Amino acid sequence: MGFGLWLLLDNQSFIVVLNNSTGIKVACYILIGVGALSMLMGFLGCLGAIYEIRCLLGLYFTCLLLILLAQITAGALIYFQKTVLHEEMSKIVSKVLDNYPGNNSTTEQAWDFIQRNMHCCGWNNHEDWNGNMIVTNSSRLLFPCSCQNISLVTGNFSDSGFCEAQTPEWPVYDTGCASSVESWLVTNIWVVLGICLAVALIELMGMSLSICLCRNIHTAEYSKVPKFQ
């Protein structure tokens, strides 16, 4: 649930750019929904343990098993579909660059932040910006300000929107942002995978304890279920 909320609400990193994809947003809502379901099942599992209700413990065990299987499936898909994910990421970024109007929106701020701090320009290189309509249709030599190589610029300069170049050669960084962004994603994915592994171990422990408790509750103990008037 926390991972889904982070993906949905983070507005200070590359996640903002990825959130332009409908698939990513759907994945966020699925994660939040599964997290909420996990919390509900945990509550029901507690009730089953306190009042020794076998059906609630069985339901808790079944839901934990399904969630664990879903986590394993999602991890396998991510691992074996890395090429597809890379291509999808390229398409998302290309769409952002092509539609970049320079009006300082949240997505633009995130991409400007990436280019400015990672010292890169475009996804593969600065030529990716040639698909932007403002750059293409302008009579001036415009380039994205967040791309500009500080060592090649003198005087005051902006860090967002578009700037005007004095020559056809843009004073920008030569390298694209793909390698830097992928390195950032790999670093964060390892953190997420570590958390998922810890959660999976806790789930396995919860499943083992719940099934042991369920097996040791005798049918006659149903008399312990509280009766409400």
Image: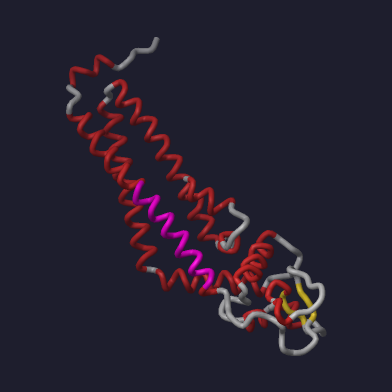
Give how far across and how far down residue 71 sits, in percent: 35, 52
Magenta region: 180-198
Horizontally, residue 157 falls left or right of residue 93, namely right
Judge whether 25 appears above or below 200 on screen.
below
Give how far across and how far down residue 44 sits, in percent: 36, 30
Secondary structure character of the magenta stretch overall: helix
Residue projecting furthest to the top: 229
Q: Which of 178 and 118 is in front in this view?
A: 118
Q: Which of 119 and 51 is in front in this view?
A: 119
Give how far across and how far down residue 168 sits, in percent: 75, 90
Residue 169's image quarter? bottom right
Tag count in the figure? 0
Horizontally, residue 201 falls left or right of residue 133, namely left
Residue 132's image quarter? bottom right
Judge whether 114 appears above or below 210 on screen.
below
Residue 91's image quarter? bottom right
Q: Residue drawn 77% across and 89% down?
A: 167
Judge whether 219 appears above or below 227 on screen.
below
Horizontally, residue 217 falls left or right of residue 134, namely left
Q: Residue drawn 66% across and 70% down?
A: 116
Q: Residue drawn 79% across and 73% down?
A: 157
Rendered-image quadrant of the C terminus: top left
